[in-house]
Image (cartoon, grey):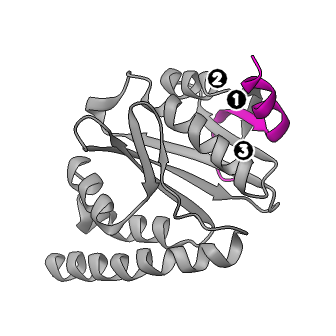
């Protein structure tokens, strides 16, 4: 029974990811298929193959988490980017940008495979993706919510140009999270220095 659920989950996920770009194109004013590059990274839209690599490397038990992952990827209000190391062509993580209720506002989230943390890859990717969003899409602000105990998370937010705005309790949460944001004008002003 578990294998049937797993295969159904993968089939459904595959269908969902293929439809994702179509639905996002209805919400977003421009093509998101543009690949981005930094000195050390290739950044592209997440594919089914990328998803399989990430799930395999994160050792996710699909029988327990498969439906949660499907719900995560099936939403059409997300931009999902895969981060690939230039020197080895290895997938090292992903970045998600989620459109919030106010259409000019996005929330960012990133995840790196454990062996790639602590090297500045997330900061490098976030800066490039912020530039893409603010330069090509109609969004005015990007925000991040970081657990208070996640020192690496808030360092990434700060070093990628976001400002700490205070602690908040998010809807449905029982603990406070740190709230960071960057707006379009602040992003472009940072480039001048």
Q: How crowded is mark 1: few (under 14 residues within 10 Å), some or many (20 or more)?
A: many
Using the rendered view, name the quadrant where residue 32 is placed: bottom right
Magenta-drawn stretch contains 177: yes
Residue 15 x, y percent position in the rendering: 38, 83
The label number, if any, that marks residue 158 in the structure image:
2
Circle 1 is placed at which residue position?
162
Residue range of the region highlighted in magenta in the rendering = 170-193
Q: What element carries label 3?
A: strand
Residue 76 against residue 157 in the figure, above or below = below
The label number, if any, that marks residue 142 in the structure image:
3
- Cβ atoms at labels 1 and 2 below 8 Å apart: yes
Relative to residue 70, is residue 147 drawn left or right? right
Q: What element carries label 1?
A: loop
Disc 3 from disc 2: Cα separation: 13 Å
The label number, if any, that marks residue 40 in the structure image:
none
Q: Is mark 2 on a helix, strand or loop?
A: helix
Residue 75 x, y percent position in the rendering: 56, 71
């Amino acid at each position: 029974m578990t294998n049937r659920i797993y295969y159904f989950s993968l089939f459904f996920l595959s269908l969902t990811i293929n439809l994702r770009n179509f639905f996002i194109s209805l919400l977003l004013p421009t093509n998101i298929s543009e690949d981005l590059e930094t000195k050390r990274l290739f950044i592209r839209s997440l594919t089914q193959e990328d998803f399989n690599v990430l799930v395999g490397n994160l050792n996710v038990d699909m029988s327990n988490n498969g439906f949660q992952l499907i719900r995560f990827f099936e939403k059409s209000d997300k931009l999902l980017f895969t981060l690939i190391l230039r020197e080895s062509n290895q997938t090292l993580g992903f970045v998600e940008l989620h459109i919030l209720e106010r259409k000019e506002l996005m929330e960012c989230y990133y995840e790196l495979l454990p062996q790639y943390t602590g090297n500045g890859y997330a900061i490098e990717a976030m800066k490039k993706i912020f530039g893409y969003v603010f330069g090509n899409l109609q969004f005015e602000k990007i925000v991040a919510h970081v657990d208070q105990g996640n020192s690496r998370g808030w360092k990434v937010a700060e070093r990628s140009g976001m400002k700490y705005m205070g602690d908040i309790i998010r809807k449905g949460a029982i603990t406070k999270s740190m709230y960071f944001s960057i707006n379009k004008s602040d992003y472009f002003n940072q480039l001048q220095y």
